[in-house]
Image (spheres, rainbow, N blue to C red):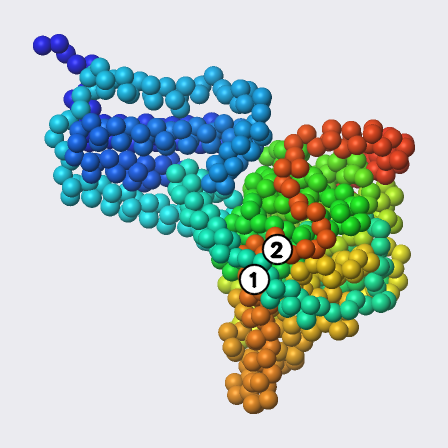
Amino acid sequence: MKKSYYPNWLNKRMGFFTLLVLLSWAKAIFAYLVDFNLGVENAFQYFILFINPFATTIFILSAALYIKNKKASYITMLLLYTVMSILLFSNVTYYREFTDFITINTMLGAGKVSSGLGESALRLFRWYDFVYLLDLVILPVLLLRKKIKMEEKPMRGRFAIAITTCAVLFFLGNLTLAETSRPELLKRTFSRDYLVKYLGINAFTAYDGIQTFKTNQTRAQANENDVVNVEQYVADHRVKPNPDTFGMAKGRNVIYIHLESLQQFMINYKLKDENGVEHEVTPFLNSLYNGTDTYSFSNFFHQVKSGKTSDAETLLENSFFGLNQGPLFTQLGSKNTFQAAPAILGQKAGYTSAVFHGNAGTFWNRNETYKRLGYDYFFDASNYDVTAENSFQYGLHDKPFFNQSIQYLEHLQQPFYTKMIAVSNHYPYSEFKGDEAGFPIAQTNDTTINGYFATANYLDKAVEEFFNYLKDSGLYDKSMIILYGDHYGVSNSRNTELAPLLGKDAETWTDFDNAQLQRVPMMFHIPGTTTGGVQDTYGGQVDVLPTLLGLLGLDTKPYLMLGQDLLSPDRDGIVAFRNGDFLTSDYTVLHDVIYDNKTGELIAEPTPELSETIAALTDKVKLQLSNSDSLTNGDLLRFHDAGLTDVNPEDYNYTKQLPQLEAIEQELGAGSTSVYNQNKNTSTVDLYKTKTYKEYNEAK
């Protein structure tokens, strides 16, 4: 008898099933390690990465085990395996061009994908791509030529159920490990990279499909009548701008500086070292905050939820809230209609808009959402020289980030609206090494808190260097610089360790204290102004856009903004948190528990009058949040006429942007308003001066 070249187990249905599982796993791992850049940081994440293809592959292929007919069972297995292989390979080629993964919306708009790739599609293929596709030809040939024989005996139903059940249990185990490494992975969906890294391509696609279905259902049921209630709320809620500040910054450039994770208590704070010597943590930011050329807010609160940084951007750009579950950027950012600040300023005041961010463009789905917000340009990590020495897991460190951003900033046509997203002051607040080390580390039992002050000091120095550049380049006097904290840096669970540094007793720390720490910096710095100063009005991030438009002298009436101008004397001063809690100047209300802001004491038995007041305030908060949810979940802005041309995301291309900017300069010639042109076509990059912490100390 002629000896078979193939092991006998391949001639069993379960053997062929196992072969397909192993091949699918091998392809996925190959893609993870060769084609995808998933940011794996440690051995634990590598372990999760190596096991994540198994659960979904086994689950999907197990569907074929329920089919008793021999040929139908094998053909189904092959078809399912082929679909998974094509899905993986499609993501590989798509990732090579867009550094992103294919979503259900992308699949539904396949024409857009193909047009995006165009004639360049061929260059996306690599010589080793046969790894992904060759077996799709070989396996059917082996079956047809009976080199691999089909087992006649059908699989027992109970055994098939057991395989499916094992796959489900395996997935739950995988998810548990993933949540250990990245809590609230499915709720927050930070990035598609994260979902693939922890759960795999198949799980990501299924999850994206579920989220897309939910979104489409809500959106499909909305109609023009639904926006009427929101329009009425906005009309009733709108306040008149302050006549003393309206138009104060008209025509100026707008530069947002994102102060990552910086809380208000850091402003004017001095940290004592082990010798009792005090060190000012943010001396430069303090000088801005306390100056008369800055409108600063001492009672300004973040209003984010699980979307955190992206929620802050949602609030600031649109004046409505993020979602109650998950980030709006990732769930609705690729689909919804927006009437955001970049589009408003671009269409109504001729502003050029750009975002600068030294991290991956796919993080928080920014590369897609920014297009729908109307941003002309988005400079992500692919536009920067990012190395292991000048970056960390969340992107480029702040000093090289600001430094390298100048090459693009100087080519923007003025006036411009820009956002600089600095990230070095991000959890876990790792200590700086080498020449950037030196700022004292706090002495608590929590290493996260200990490093927070040093990274905040680094951020402060980076911002100061950027301001120096603005002054030297001539941009400073033409601009309004807005500095904001996006969310807390120290979580509530760590606040008892932080308490002694704030002069508080950890034993008596309460939820009231946690709520007060949700203050973040908010400063509108307007060079030349002398009427600024620290404002004690209560406000939140939802109020920033109407404040901005007021300072620029633009009418807010056409737009559905849920916030109120922070500088208006008529504002109501209610700050809503996304979970329904809220603050006013007098009270803090947390889960129906009332605290007196002056004393911090719990009001255990409120008077009937106070109960009535709190009930009325609660209704106002619920109404604001419900209108926000209606606006976003129903995509109601598509029904609202704000006098703006609809933003078309296909009009924006975030690749090869510097040549785009240079082409505009050449076309405009002497009419170009860029700093580069006004500097007689000479770069201002060298005007940016940077020093390390060690050099700063040596210069003292």
Q: Secondary structure at mark 1?
A: helix
- Residue picked out by circle 2: 639
- Residue shown at 49%/56% (left/top)? 221
Of the numbered discs in the image, which one, if any, rests on residue 226?
1
Q: Is residue 414 left or right of residue 16?
A: right
Q: Amino acid at mark 2?
A: Phe
- Residue shown at 28%/47% (left/top)? 169
Q: Nearer the viewer, residue 425 or 216?
A: 216
Q: Quadrant of residue 282?
A: bottom right
**Residue 541 placement (x, y as % from top left):** 66, 61
- Residue shown at 76%/47% (left/top)? 347
Q: Secondary structure at mark 2?
A: helix
Can you say whether 388 is above or below 262 in the image?
above
Can you say whether 46 is above or below 631 in the image?
above
Q: Is residue 231 left or right of residue 249?
A: left
In the image as oriented, which residue stretches furthest toward the top?
2
Q: Amino acid at mark 1?
A: Asp
Q: Mark 2, residues whose alpha carbon is within 10 Å: few (<14), some, or many (≥20)?
A: some
Q: Nearer the viewer, residue 384 or 225?
A: 225
Q: Quadrant of residue 174?
A: top left
Q: Mark 1, residues whose alpha carbon is within 10 Å: few (<14), some, or many (≥20)?
A: some
Q: Is residue 203 left or right of residue 343?
A: left
**Residue 592 placement (x, y as % from top left):** 51, 77
Of the numbered discs in the image, which one, if any, rests on residue 323?
none
Is residue 526 visible to us here?
no
- Residue shown at 16%/41% (left/top)? 157
Question: Separation of disc 1 and disc 2 at Cα?
Answer: 9 Å
> In the rendered picture of this protein, how many numbered marks are placed on residues?
2
The reply to whether the C-beta atoms of the residues labelled 1 and 2 are less than 8 Å apart is yes
**Residue 621 placement (x, y as % from top left):** 59, 71
**Residue 428 placement (x, y as % from top left):** 55, 50
